[in-house]
Image: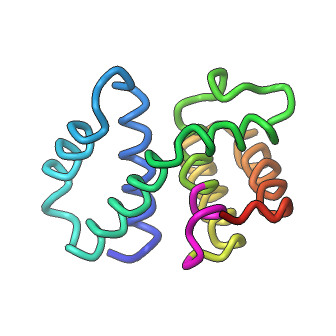
Amino acid sequence: MGRRNARKLAFYLLFQYDFVRDGNYDEVRDTFLTLADDEITENDREYILSKTGGVMDHLEEIDRTIGDYARGWTVERMSKVDKAILRLAVYEIKFSPDVPDGVAINEAVELAKVYSSDEAPAFINGILGKVAGSGADA
């Protein structure tokens, strides 16, 4: 499948989780993986679980980081699409040494171009550029 598509599925899973926030990540994850089972390999599954599990493990810190750099916006006011994209990319920047910051930012901007508003790519790029530039390594 490739990293780009696996990252897209990780974004989908985080997006779905935000809709059932009162639910449980494990249930959302299991349902998602069952439905996507035909299109993902074991390597894809491991990648998706690594990224989304990492986001969930660091969710409060990730949201705090997003809020610190999103001037005039709170995480709660952001669209669910933008939140999912930002959460995944901030996780990759701060906690995934296997993903270069530039790749995390570029992939997030590409997701925003496809799934969000016309203004979202610049908004997301600006926030992530600040996160990466802050030396915010774990």
**Image quadrant for the N terminus?**
bottom left
Instruction: Locate the C terminus by quadrant.
Output: bottom right
Above or below, comparing residue 129 to residue 57 in the picture: below
Dominant secondary structure of the magenta stretch?
Answer: helix
> Residue 71 location, x and y as percent?
86, 33
Quadrant location of residue 101?
A: bottom right
Q: Is residue 107 left or right of residue 120?
A: left
Write down the region rendered in magenta. 91-98
Image quadrant in which you'd find residue 8 = bottom left
Give yes or no for residue 94 being in the magenta stretch: yes
Please give the name of the residue rendered at 48% of the width and 50% of the height, measured from the top-left corner: 55
User: How many numbered circles does the render carry?
Assistant: 0
Of the pair 111 and 61, the residue shown nearer to us: 61
Residue 131 position, x and y percent, is: 78, 55
Can you give x and y, in whole percent of width and height, for residue 121 in the image? 72, 49
Left or right, residue 115 beside residue 41: right
Q: Residue furthest front?
A: 138
> As displayed, is residue 113 above or below residue 70?
below
* Residue drawn where x is 20% and y is 64% of the image: 39
- The answer to whether 63 appears left or right of 68 in the picture is left
Residue at 26% across / 66% down in the picture?
45
Which quadrant of the view contains residue 40? bottom left
Q: Is residue 110 above or below residue 118?
A: below
Residue 49 vs 17, above or below: the answer is: below
Residue 65 inside the magenta-drawn segment: no
Residue at left offset 56%, top offset 69%: 96
Figure coloring: rainbow
Q: Nearer the viewer, residue 24 or 89?
A: 24
Give the x, y percent position of residue 105.
68, 62
